[in-house]
Amino acid sequence: MNARGQYGDVCGQYVSTGVGQGSIIPHTPTEVEDELDQLHGELMCFGQEVIELTKPLEAGARGTVQTVRNEELAAWKVVNSFQPLVDEVYRIEKQLNAAGVDSKVTAVWREESEPPYADIVVVSTGRAEPIKQQFIQAKRALDSFMPKARRREAIKRARELSGQRSELEGKALGESPLVQWTRSVWVPFFESWRKFHSEKKDVPLQTWPLSGTWDHIQDYRKQWIDLRKNAPFKSKCPDPLEPRKDPSITGGIGEFLTIGKYLLIGTLAIGGVVVLSSVAVRVKKGRDPIEPYARLYRGGRNPS
């Protein structure tokens, strides 16, 4: 925790990931930015805990589908075996396009042409002819290593196995209360906060006094405290700060009007006591209690 009370190295460096009514108490841009980073640091610490707690669960889920995972890895190994030859075909195709051969034509050659590539041979490419011959050689090397039909089948199988493995792992993880809570509660909240935090940090005007950003941070802080309180584990991070929401502009005006009303009532009450006291004194001395005020009404001297 630093001199401002912010969390820092506890969770590593801060990572940037609506606006309420403006507060009647103007907070400087520095104060607002510090408040943004303070809450972001708290959330980053908590988020790291979530990651560490779910790692063993993810490992367990992978273990339950190890057989499918092994098959998936083997399938992708087959695909990777011919990928360099595919890349070479693409590389020379780009050279053909740069030399003026239509990309739609070369795409057909790449995807559909088969040995002996007669459809490619009969097309004259002028100065690009030497490049075309390199393209045919690259195609021949690829098809000799593995025919097109087998390559497509290998890719299809690898993708299907990846989908199966992902689905099985998801089911295994989905049985954990922590994972369910993380997906449905923590991730949506943190993504919303990260977007808000990034927008406010990137636009200086958003941190100016009366922008409303301060109050909206406090709204997030309240949600964050409730979320942490109801999490399926007890966090070891420092306790979060309480919301520090100031009176809004609308609420502040209402408060000032209320205070003004009572001040006016008090002033009138004090004035009434003074008048009554003056009247009582004049009656006691046998004087007309009304005459001074009648003279005041007519523009005379103040009553005494």
Image: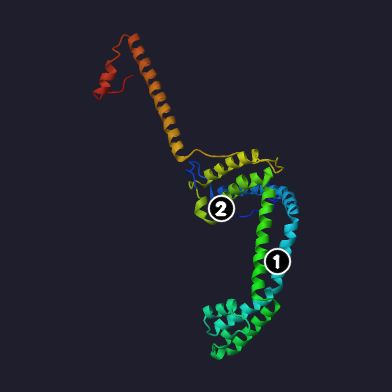
- Mark sitting on residue 294: none
Q: Residue furthest bottom?
A: 126
Q: Disc 2 versus disc 1: distance between alpha carbons?
A: 36 Å
Name the residue type under label 1: Trp
Name the residue type under label 2: Lys
The secondary structure type at the circle numbered 2 is: helix
Please identify, in this view, whether the residue under mark 2 or under mark 1 is nearer the observer. Answer: 1
Report whether 118 appears left or right of 76: left
Residue at x-position 63% and y-position 79%: 89
Q: Residue furthest left?
A: 298
- Mark sitting on residue 76: 1
Number of other residues with Cα within 10 Å of mark 1, as a class: few under 14, some 14 to 19, many 20 or more: some
In the picture of the structure, the residue carrying the numbered disc 2 is 195
Q: Position of residue 260 (x, y in %)?
A: 42, 30
Any part of residue 280 in sight: yes
Q: Position of residue 5 (x, y in %)?
A: 65, 45
Any part of residue 34 in sight: no
Q: How is the image coloured?
A: rainbow
Number of other residues with Cα within 10 Å of mark 2, as a class: few under 14, some 14 to 19, many 20 or more: few
The secondary structure type at the circle numbered 1 is: helix
Locate residue 276: give its quadrant.
top left
Q: Is residue 104 above or below residue 270?
A: below
